[in-house]
């Protein structure tokens, strides 16, 4: 049985989520562009390119939001074949060192970056099982795999995403649900905030390929997992311009 043609992409208002929504729509999926922010710009650009999309207002931290989004999509379009858990935050509330981090900041980052993807998987997997399968990609980070400055809550959340991805892959492979994660290097999106050109260049120089990544380069890996990766599950795959391949000199 072919997978259902509808995909949910969270974080679709901007950055990697927007590029992913546009890419999956160009590949022929109907894309539910989910975000806590308005996704009209993404939906319009998909439709202008001849694709099919709709906006869904969703706070990924809310189980209730997830069930009403999934129920609504099931009613309008039938089963959901694909989920890309892209939405995420960095800690903008406090310092993000182990000691300097506040409880409020920890809860915000863990709720968004770890609980959010779990709630998303919990919401879609039963329908995928009923429909004969599905594909899920979660966005982790290089911070899940390497120590980096001032990313304590973020690295804990993204490490959790890598572990949860492996666990979901383990539990549902025999139901034809393949679950993988991507660990991006530094990608040029609004999440970088107002960093100076010098800091941007320093980030770019961390990669063996000495530039920042582009959102489309993560989107194309999501598309690969969804359309091609028929023998891949449980991975956290680095798309990082060679950063994780670098020696320490
Ligand atoms: N840009 C990078 O360098 C980089 C590197 C590694 C991992 N990532 C991860 O990639 C993902 C996308 O990041 P980006 O760079 O596109 O960031 P971004 O800030 O440009 O986009 C994040 C999106 O998530 C949405 N979002 C935030 N909280 C939400 C919530 N509670 N519910 C629903 N939507 C919410 C935002 O509204 C926004 O549209 C994140 O998970 C991020 O941690 C980014």
Image (spheres, rainbow, N blue to C red):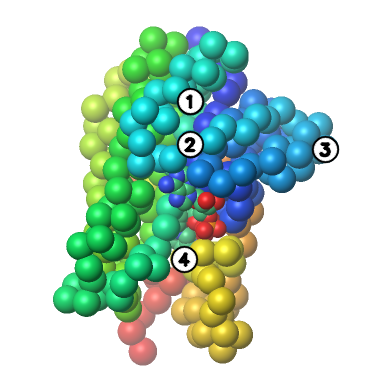
Is 202 or 110 nearer to us in this picture? 110
> Counting residues from the N terminus, which is met first, the one under dot 1 or under dot 2?
2
> Counting residues from the N terminus, which is met first, the one under dot 3 or under dot 1?
3
**Residue assigned mark 3:** 48
Q: Cβ(mark 2) to ligand 1 < 8 Å?
A: yes
Where residue 80 appears, as percent x and y from the top left, is: 50, 21
> Counting residues from the N terminus, which is met first, the one under dot 1 or under dot 4?
1
Disc 3 from disc 2: Cα separation = 24 Å
Where residue 22 appears, as percent x and y from the top left, is: 67, 42
> Counting residues from the N terminus, which is met first, the one under dot 3 or under dot 4?
3
Disc marking residue 58: 2
**Residue assigned mark 1:** 69
> Counting residues from the N terminus, which is met first, the one under dot 4 or under dot 2?
2
**Residue assigned mark 4:** 185
Residue 107 in view, yes or no = yes
Q: Cβ(mark 4) to ligand 1 < 8 Å?
A: yes
Residue at image coords 48%, 36%: 58
């Amino acid at each position: 049985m072919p997978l259902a043609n509808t995909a949910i992409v969270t974080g679709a208002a901007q950055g990697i989520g927007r590029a992913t929504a546009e890419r999956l729509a160009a590949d022929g999926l109907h894309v539910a562009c989910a975000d806590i922010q308005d996704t009209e710009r993404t939906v319009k650009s998909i439709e202008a390119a001849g694709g099919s999309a709709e906006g869904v207002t969703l706070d990924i931290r809310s189980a209730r939001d997830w069930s009403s989004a999934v129920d609504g999509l099931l009613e309008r379009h039938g089963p959901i074949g694909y989920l890309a858990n892209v939405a995420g935050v960095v800690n903008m509330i406090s310092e993000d060192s182990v000691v300097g981090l506040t409880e409020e900041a920890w809860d915000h980052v863990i709720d968004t970056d770890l609980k959010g993807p779990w709630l998303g998987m919990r919401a879609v997997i039963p329908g995928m099982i009923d429909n004969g399968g599905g594909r899920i990609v979660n966005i982790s980070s290089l911070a899940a795999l390497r120590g980096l400055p001032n990313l304590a809550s973020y690295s804990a959340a993204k490490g959790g995403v890598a572990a949860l991805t492996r666990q979901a892959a383990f539990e549902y492979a025999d139901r034809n649900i393949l679950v993988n994660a991507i660990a991006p290097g530094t990608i040029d999106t609004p999440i970088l905030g107002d960093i100076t050109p010098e800091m941007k260049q320093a980030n770019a120089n961390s990669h063996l390929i000495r530039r920042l990544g582009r959102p489309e380069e993560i989107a194309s890996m999501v598309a690969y997992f969804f359309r091609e990766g028929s023998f891949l599950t449980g991975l956290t795959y680095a798309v990082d311009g060679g950063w994780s391949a670098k020696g320490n000199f």
